[in-house]
Image: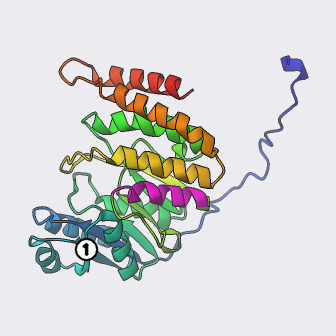
Amino acid sequence: MTAQKRAKIDPALGLDLVQSRTLANRDATVAVVIPAHNEQGTIAEVVGDAHQALTLLETEGEVIVSASGCTDDTANIASDSGAKVIEAPAGKGLAMLAGIQASRADIVCLIDGDLRYYGDEPLAAALVSPILKGISDATIADLYWRPLYPQLWLHGFFAPLAGKLFPELLPKTGSTPWSGQRAALRKYWPTELPDGFTSDLAILLHWNDLGISLRPVLADDWVNPQRPKPDLMRQEFSLLVDHAVRLGRISETEVAKLETWFTTAHNLMAEYKPDDDDPQEFEGSLLKRSLAALD
């Protein structure tokens, strides 16, 4: 069809232009919930940052540490640092749910108990501020990350697969959709989650189903322990595909083809050689090859 024959799209430019701010600030309380499993080395710092965030936000709130199957001194240190401590079963999803359910605030922000953040303001303040300003219903940290491993996951696995199954999700999550650092109005948190680390992805899918305003928040420098989870990507694959089947995004017969692609994507990611490959060049090539395999 030529350009002359294409249907005209009316962008309604200039329609209903406003002369003042239309968004409304929220008068809301805030809970910073910190899931923690044996984090005695960092928990005092994380709790302190959470209290500072509440001060900067100038809102009433609470800091809750959800001690998840801890066998060290995490709970005592957290309590001495001024947090409310609850005991939760082992498993990140269970720890998050226990902390959310124990809170009473209008907005809940999750911050991992092993995260050391070096920004000028605490990360919880950066995540909650857009919600208090009425800009967003939920936020997720877009974290600057040096090692390539999460980018392998992003470019080789998540972006191609989520772009195929849930294309509307990608613009909402930033470059680190795996981040556990996030905030949302209380009513948007799920009441059920997987026990383990797929809970972070399950929350994103839940928010996507609700169609709420989810926005990434650019974050500053940070560090946390690198703990390889070799089975996690496979579990996330199953979570994404099963959810897509339930929603009718794909049929059961297409799952076998995606299984074949997953093996290919995994093998492409395994080709990375830290001593030989340039990280940026490799991740760009990885995205192209993974997309080609998916197509």
Indicate left or right for 160 with 196 as reference: right
Asked which secondary structure carries label 1, the reply is strand
Tell me what residue is drawn at x 16 percent, y 71 percent.
Answer: 70
Camera-side residue: 261 or 112?
A: 261
Indicate left or right for 78 with 58 as reference: left
Q: Which residues are magenta?
A: 197-209
Does the image show residue 167? no
Does the image show residue 208? yes
Relative to 106, say whether 288 is above or below: above
Tell me what residue is drawn at x 46 percent, y 58 percent.
Answer: 202
Tell me what residue is drawn at x 69 percent, y 56 percent.
Answer: 19
Tell me what residue is drawn at x 9 percent, y 70 percent.
Answer: 72
Residue 172 percent location from the top left of the image: 52, 48
Residue 253 percent location from the top left of the image: 62, 41
Task: Please name the predominant secondary structure of the magenta segment in the image.
Answer: helix
Local packing at callout 1 (Cα closer than 10 Å; few below 14, some 14-19, many 20+) is: many
Indicate left or right for 48 with 217 as reference: left
Give the residue type that dot 1 points to. Answer: Val
Q: How many marks?
A: 1
Q: Is residue 118 magenta?
A: no
Residue 136 percent location from the top left of the image: 53, 60
Q: Residue furthest right?
A: 5
User: What is the quadrant of the C terminus in the image?
Assistant: top right
Residue 243 percent location from the top left of the image: 55, 53
Relative to 122, say whether 75 is above or below: below
| Residue where numbered disc 1 is placed | 65
Camera-side residue: 221 or 58?
A: 221
